Image (cartoon, rainbow, N blue to C red):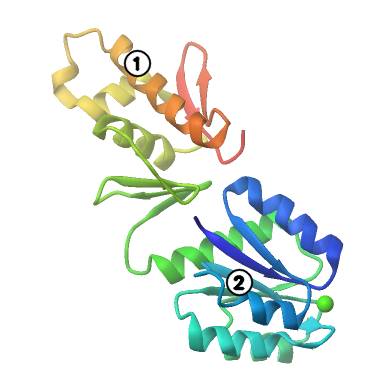
Amino acid sequence: MITLLIIEDERSLRESMVSYLEPGGYRCITAGTYHEAMKAIDRYDYYCVVVDLNLPDGDGLKIIRLLKENQAKCGIIVISARDTLNDRILGLQTGADDYLVKPFDLSELNARIQSVIRRTRYTGQNYVIFRELIMDPEGKTAVLNGEQLELTRKEFDMLMYLITNKNRVITKDAIAEHIWGDSIYGTDYTEVVYTHMKNLRKKLQAKTGIDWIQTVYGSGYRITEES
Ligand code: CA
């Protein structure tokens, strides 16, 4: 599972981050103090640590230094009310990957976390990230919410095609042509596309609880970042 460590002493903010991030498939470990953070640091191999600089019993910058020494692949995002340029530079110089000034939108935090994980874990590779899904076009594998998503080759191609054309309506004709090419001509592909799409949706829904793919009646299908 993709595990995050949230270090923030302000309880309501900490809890709102967790309740926003957990439905996205992350496991969130929390620490409300420097001391708690120190204990939590070695418990998991974290994909990303979100750390507040001002903690009642210590400095978040020290935590960053320690993380850089011990968890090289862990992304680090500083969240702080210290919005002076100096603090920002200091945070990034210490090894943080990103810096978010309070108050911030949780959706913005989520986007930054995804981007940091992409950079620190999947550098140099062309992974496609969509919502809680990471797709590897070369290996034809997909990971959803940190777990392998078993797809047939056709389902994989279909999903990739929808994602690369997200927010647009894709017709059954376009899908058929893209996936099956010329071999589709002369056959009734409507049913074939429908069946593969149905199975793909079922698999996504089983893991997310949501139907990611919208049917646009009479036109085709569409996938969007939110549904
Ligand atoms: Ca604080």
Residue 49 circle label:
2
182 in relation to 60, above or below: above
* Left or right: 145, with 193 as reference point: right
Q: Position of residue 55 (x, y in %)?
A: 80, 82
Q: Mark 1 points at which residue?
A: 195
Residue density around tag 1, few if under 14, some if 14–19, many if 20 or more, within 10 Å:
few
126 left or right of 184 in image: right
Q: Nearer the viewer, residue 186 or 96?
A: 96
Name the spot of residue 167 as percent of width and height, x first.
52, 35
Residue at 36% over, 19% down: 172
Give x and y (percent) for residue 174. 32, 24
Q: Which of 169 and 81 is in front in this view?
A: 81
Q: What element carries label 2?
A: strand
Percent position (x, y) of residue 99?
66, 76
Please tell me which of labels 2 and 1 falls first in the chain.
2
Q: Is residue 169 visible?
A: no
Residue in the foreground of this view, choosing between 214 and 33: 33
Q: What's the distance in space between the residues labelled 2 and 1, CA to CA?
A: 41 Å
- Tell me the kind of residue under disc 1: Thr
Residue at the image point whose x is 65% and y is 85% from the top: 63
Crowd tier of the residue under label 2, counting other residues whose Cα lies within 10 Å: few below 14, some 14–19, many 20 or above? many
Residue drawn at point x = 60 percent, y = 48 percent: 24
Q: Which of marks 2 and 1 is in front?
A: 2
Q: Which amino acid does the dot numbered 2 rest on?
A: Val
Q: In which quarter of the image is residue 127?
A: bottom left
Q: Is residue 76 above or below residue 186?
A: below
Residue 84, quarter of picture? bottom right
Residue 201 makes an appearance in the image? yes
